Image (spheres, helix red, strand yellow):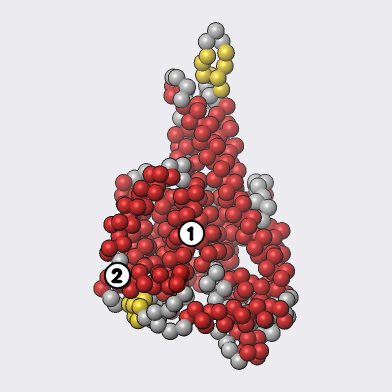
């Protein structure tokens, strides 16, 4: 009686829905155009409304693609659609009954509607591991260009201006001009640089990710954004919690701190310390924020069903004679959309986190199953030829899902001190979560098929 591996000789079918590579190419151009704000950088692109025209083209393409996929495939559901519909209904109600209808309508058209298209494009075009690589490459190029551009501006001092007692780095475009916005973008890039490092196999790809990580950290430091400092600490904590080699990670962080801390200018060390001391270097930023939070809570108690999309400053002016916005995501949702919008929005975010965590665990389990098969003697002789590529695909799926999971958590942390409800971050995360869920669904089926080709039999 002996044990052997029986290869049934079948070729693994391509399990992923097909998407046009040309559409993915145009979507990648849109990603670069949007993040880099080419209309601001080049007059000709602004004159012809390049981003708008490309976006309209992709919307039409997406609608036809969705119709075709609906006919050809039964798409797996991530379970987010009911809550997404409920969230959209909350937004519509809070526009119709807004205290300031003009502002609400403007925000809906120019931010909510526009930014939601990014999520739609991701769902339509990112349908397989190869498309996921394509998308990740375009996103990393956009992050890399923005971070290195700002980091170089910090080193030569061209975009550093004094604010609240410290020189703070500003971005080159209106999208990330404010130091907090620039730091938020850079902080969000760090998880992708970290997790994609293991998935990327080329030395030059790994090198670019290292450069991205260094430039992003530099942007966070020079921005003087205490919120992003806190977000970075939370990211390190998440890495430690989920790391399988905690001691090695602690040693790595310890060495990194020993090398980097002496090189950090004292102004930024002092800025970081104010997170814990509560004492400002200059000005009264914290006192102002406390006043805003108190006013926001009063507004919420007065209007628990919401004052309308982006209408808090109007109500605050009427009630207290002050006009600054909430500077807090949680109170922004509560005051703008009411208690019902608060429940719907954060349920949607929780489900995204749950789905991403499940994807990471499931893919890790699939990789362990494959490793167990490969550990059997002489198994390499009968492994399906597509197994190696499939393993690389699984690693890529897990890396992107892990990065996005940390990205969403970081956005929630940054939301403690920032108002991000109408930003692109949530639509980006929602679209990528749905795409990852569907890619993962087909990847699991592919794993089962390939493993079935290497079932041990008794002879």
Say above or below: 19 vs 178. Answer: above
Q: Residue at x 35, y 69 (%)?
A: 269
Residue at image mark 1: 234
- Within 10 Å of disc 2 (Cα), the crowding (few <14, some 14-19, many 20+) is few
Residue at image mark 2: 265
Q: Residue at x 37, y 62 (%)?
A: 217
Rendered-image quadrant of the C terminus: top right
- Within 10 Å of disc 1 (Cα), the crowding (few <14, some 14-19, many 20+) is some
Front one among 214 and 200: 214
Q: Picture quarter containing residue 60? A: bottom right
Report whether residue 46 is seen: no
Q: Position of residue 354 (x, y in %)?
A: 62, 51
Front one among 237 and 72: 237
Extreme residue toward the front, this view: 277
> N-terminal of the two: label 1 or label 2?
1
Say above or below: 430 vs 285. Answer: above
Q: Is residue 22 left or right of residue 333?
A: left
Q: Position of residue 422 (x, y in %)?
A: 58, 72
| Numbered mark located on residue 414 in the image | none
Q: Picture quarter containing residue 138? A: bottom left
Assign a secondary structure to mark 2: loop
Q: Residue at x 61, y 55 (%)?
A: 352
Say above or below: 269 vs 280. Answer: above
Assign a secondary structure to mark 1: helix
Pointer 1 with pointer 2, Cβ within 8 A: no
């Amino acid at each position: 009686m002996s044990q052997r591996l029986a290869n049934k000789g079948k070729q693994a079918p391509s399990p992923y829905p097909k998407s046009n590579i040309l559409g993915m190419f145009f979507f990648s151009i849109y990603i670069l155009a949007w993040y880099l704000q080419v209309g601001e950088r080049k007059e000709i692109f602004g004159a012809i409304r390049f981003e708008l025209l490309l976006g309209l083209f992709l919307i039409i393409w997406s609608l036809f693609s969705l119709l075709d996929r609906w006919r050809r495939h039964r798409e797996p559901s991530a379970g987010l659609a009911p809550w997404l519909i409920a969230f959209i209904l909350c937004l519509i109600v809070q526009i119709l009954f807004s205290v300031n209808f003009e502002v609400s309508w403007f925000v809906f058209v120019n931010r909510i509607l526009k930014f939601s298209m990014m999520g739609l494009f991701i769902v339509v075009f990112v349908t397989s591991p190869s498309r996921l690589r394509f998308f990740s490459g375009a996103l990393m190029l956009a992050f890399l260009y923005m971070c290195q551009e700002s980091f170089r501006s910090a080193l030569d001092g061209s975009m550093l201006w004094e604010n609240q007692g410290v020189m703070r780095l500003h971005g080159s475009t209106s999208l990330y001009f404010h130091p907090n916005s620039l730091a938020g973008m850079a902080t969000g890039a760090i998880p992708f640089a970290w997790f994609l490092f293991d998935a990327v196999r080329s030395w030059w790809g790994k090198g670019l990710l290292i450069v991205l990580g260094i430039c992003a950290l530099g942007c966070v430091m020079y921005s003087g954004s205490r919120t992003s400092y806190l977000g970075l600490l939370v990211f390190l904590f998440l890495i430690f919690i989920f790391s399988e080699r905690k001691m090695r990670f602690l040693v790595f962080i310890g060495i990194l701190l020993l090398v980097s801390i002496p090189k950090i200018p004292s102004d930024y060390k002092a800025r970081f310390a104010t997170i814990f001391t509560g004492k400002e270097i200059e000005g009264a930023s914290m006192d102002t924020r406390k006043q805003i939070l108190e006013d926001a809570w009063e507004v919420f108690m007065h209007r628990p069903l919401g004052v309308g999309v982006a209408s808090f400053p109007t109500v605050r002016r009427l009630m207290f004679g002050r006009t600054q916005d909430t500077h807090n995501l949680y109170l922004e949702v509560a005051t703008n959309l009411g208690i019902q919008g608060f429940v719907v929005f954060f349920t949607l975010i929780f489900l995204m986190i749950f789905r991403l965590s499940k994807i990471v665990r499931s893919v890790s389990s699939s990789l362990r199953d494959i490793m167990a098969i490969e550990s059997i003697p002489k198994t390499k002789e009968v492994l399906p030829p597509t197994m190696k590529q499939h393993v690389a695909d699984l690693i890529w799926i897990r890396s992107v899902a892990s990065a996005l999971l940390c990205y969403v958590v970081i956005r929630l942390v940054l939301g403690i001190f920032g108002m991000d409800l109408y930003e692109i971050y949530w639509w980006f995360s929602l679209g990528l979560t749905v795409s990852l869920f569907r890619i993962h669904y087909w990847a699991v089926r592919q794993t089962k098929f390939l493993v079935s080709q290497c079932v041990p039999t008794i002879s």
